[in-house]
Image: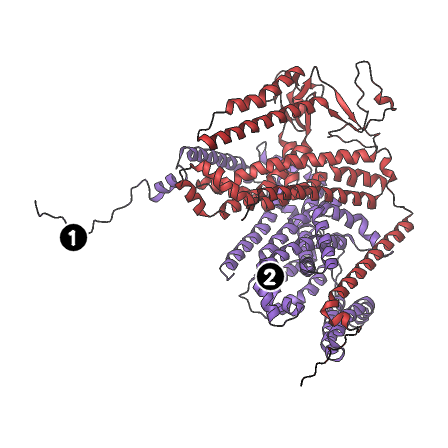
Amino acid sequence: MTSLTDPPKESFRLGMLIYDTRYRSLTIQVVALIGFMIFAAWLINNTLVNLAVQGKSIGFGFLSDPAGYDINQRLLDYNSQSTHWRAAFVGLLNTLLVAFLGCITATVIGVLVGILRLSNNWLVARLMTIYVEMFRNVPVLLWIVFTMAILIETLPAPRAFRGENPEASMVLFDSVAFTNRGVYLPEALFSRGLGDMPIFPDRDSPACQPTEDGSVEDGCGVFQISLDLILILAVFGAGLYGSSVIRKRADRIQNQTGDRPTTWYLRLGVVSIPTLIVLAALGFHLGYPALKGFNFQGGTYLRNSLIALWLALSLYTAAFIAEIVRAGILAISKGQTEAASALGLRSNRIMSLVILPQALRVIIPPLISNYLNLTKNSSLAIAVGYMDITGTLGGITMNQTGRELECVLLLMLVYLAISLTISAVMNWYNESVKLVER
Amino acid sequence: MTDIKFVRDAMVEEQEPPAATAGFVGWIRGNLFSSTLNAILTILSGGFILFVISALLPWIISPTWNAGSLRECHEILAGHEGACWGVIRERWLQLLFGFYPSELYWRVVLDFVLLIVAVAPVLFTGLPRKMLAFSAIYPFLMPWLLWGGTVWLPIAVAFGFVLGFLAHRFAKPIIGGLGGAILAFLVPVVWWLFLAGPVSGGLASVLPLALETVESRNFGGFMLSITIGVVAIAISLPIGIVLALGRQSDLLIVRSLSVGFIEFIRGVPLITLLFVASTLLNIFMPPGTDFDIIMRVIIMVTLFASAYMAEVIRGGLAALPKGQYEAADALGLNFWMSQRLIIMPQALKISIPGIVSTFIGVFKDTTLVSIIGLLDPIGLSTTIRADQNWNGIVWELYGFIGLLFFIFCFSMSRYSMFLERKLQTGHR
């Protein structure tokens, strides 16, 4: 006969919080949370006490005060009477501008160098290796100040362009001037332009009262968008879309019949003709920079600080991207190349149809983190005096108002937002090119 | 039908390969002029190299080594283009040591020589394991040699670790593992907070063994970069391990805290963290605390490096085959034992190349401290230009600084590549 005993009744003991794995994870988490909260409370308390001792209070009201300083390179209207908010925003746009330009050029240079490093030309491969090692092993800050020094020391001053027999002359049919103050490019002008559209206008302010020709002043609205630019971009985008429709149709015909219709003139026409018509309708012409007095007037002016930062960041990041591209191409097994050439593909088509699409999957994740690095490194603009958000919000605004806590906090949040956005966008792209597995 | 058959009964003489495919000519044809495009590229890059060399060499070879000012250089060169190397001769010690007292340079040099001795057994597994004992002492020796002061303070700090170990060793049999662990944590903290200062002060008054104190503000040049870089990496390693384990953990709160910290630090530029160091860190501390600026910078750079280190180590943890974790579980090891005995030794070994490249990155990023006014090499170059003897000198200084950084970082990256190759032949 067997006797069945009840399992022992479990009663909760305090020791089970630690020794029973069912409860231990909970205990650890609660302890961690409490510890973290105590630490955070300690920091906040210290901060409040210290600020009270210094007689400061926390608040962001100072951002609505006039900034009182000038920003020399800017994409929006700004003057020293504008608010700190606006200064920070102008700085943010400058950050995004240099990051955007830098990412594009860094990718182009990096891909080129990465492929050339694998070239079977001994000299070219060695030269590219030297380039990569030189840029990777020297701090980016040194490259930035070095590039700035090159621009300032080696390019001619504007006065060298003057006189009967100038020492320097403009290039590209007298349209571009490289000076030690910056580069002067022709600007796009529209004789029959549509004007600007103010965004978030304040209808009551004097700047927003329409003048005789129906336009409004520059100071109206938070910022203004050029309608001409939007129209051109819209038409150009529509052209690109039309071109892709034609390409898809050609693909379909090729799949059905095996013959690919010749479409390049159609596609070229769809993209270019409407754009050209719109440009002509708007009265597009170029405004050339010209030497007046001590400096050039007219045209688009890119300051040396922007160019130095852009150039140095691109070259520096390109060295890293080159290594990524090289590693990505090397990661594709040799059998792929051999199979492709067995199918009769030529070497450039092997690269573009077989190797690169596969290598991209290896390349993109580290490429994203290099874009992020470039964007974060653009904060070194402060070393050459380019007014990005670190220069405005974290530089002059912080020093003028003495609001270190608020400024650094905002600055960090802005960079965090940029970083998270870039990585979200690129991860989304990465998902879309990922290998679809069965 | 004929029955004539031909059978070769002797081997054909081995012949030289055609001249066009072998030897020097063959190499040139194969590697430089294999196609039209390659020939064009070769000529272009050869021309570029010649141009750079012809422009740089005469500039570099310039008899200005003994010049005392930029004006003297111009006199010596008499209108020719050339570098002014006098500035390097006069200021190279400053670029290396900043304003560290010159009669105490030996301490810095000794410190970095000992650093190599301490790091060598970690980096090169062939060396005797007993050297690791010195690696354990070194973290206490290094600050003492650099900053000076009484020898008893580092000894007292090191004694805290000994106390913790003893508490763990002797309390564990009596009050159990958990109590021992808590005691091993509490005893050293109490010692450091309340007793270490008075004890070391008392010992110093009894037996005054001390080096001359050097203020942090005299630190500068490469010595500053190396100090910040080495200290930050050394401290960030344990923090990084903890963060990486936290990020891999199943515990939601622990994981979200780790992820939050790592992503926050990695999402902001180092310069904003340095702004925190220069303006805010003292506000976060209890009223009255006043770290000096180098300490604050080291703290922030350490936090910065920890986040990157955590990601490197997480990569190492992820690269381990799952079987290793399962085998450790099957052996009945608890979490910490399996980490200490099975997982971490392998994961850290895989991560060493990543750790070295993180170190290179942090070392390069230490130049950013010049923006908040510290005198690292780039900051010093501005100071040197402010001297009216050298006002306007640019290339020589940047070239010298760049060259030193290059030598340092390049040799480290070569080491990391060597290690990667060595690890690849191992079992995976």
Q: Quadrant of residue A31?
A: bottom right
* SS for callout 1: loop
Which callout, 1 or 2, points at the residue further toward the start of the chain? 1
User: Mark 1 is on which residue type?
Assistant: Asp
Residue B423 coordinates in the image, percent (x, y): 52, 59
User: Mark 2 is on which residue type?
Assistant: Ala
Q: Would you name the residue on which mark 1 appears?
A: B9
Residue A291 visible: yes
Q: Is residue B221 left or right of residue B81?
A: right
Residue B66 visible: no
Q: Is residue B277 left or right of residue A117?
A: right
How is this picture coloured? by chain
Residue at image x 60%, y 28%? Answer: A241
Circles 1 and 2: CB distance less than 8 Å? Answer: no
Q: Quadrant of residue B73?
A: top right
Residue A225 coordinates in the image, percent (x, y): 74, 26
A156 lies above or below B7: above
Observer-nearest of B374 and A19: A19
Q: Quadrant of the N terminus of chain B?
A: top left
On residue B132, the disc is: none
B67 lies above or below B236: above
> Do discs 1 and 2 share a chain?
yes
Q: Chain of mark 2?
A: B
Q: Is residue A164 left or right of residue B148?
A: left
Residue at image x 73%, y 59%? Answer: B254
Which chain appears purple? B
Observer-nearest of A28 and A390: A28
Residue B410 coordinates in the image, percent (x, y): 56, 50
Q: Chain of mark 1?
A: B
Q: Would you name the residue on which mark 2 appears?
A: B347
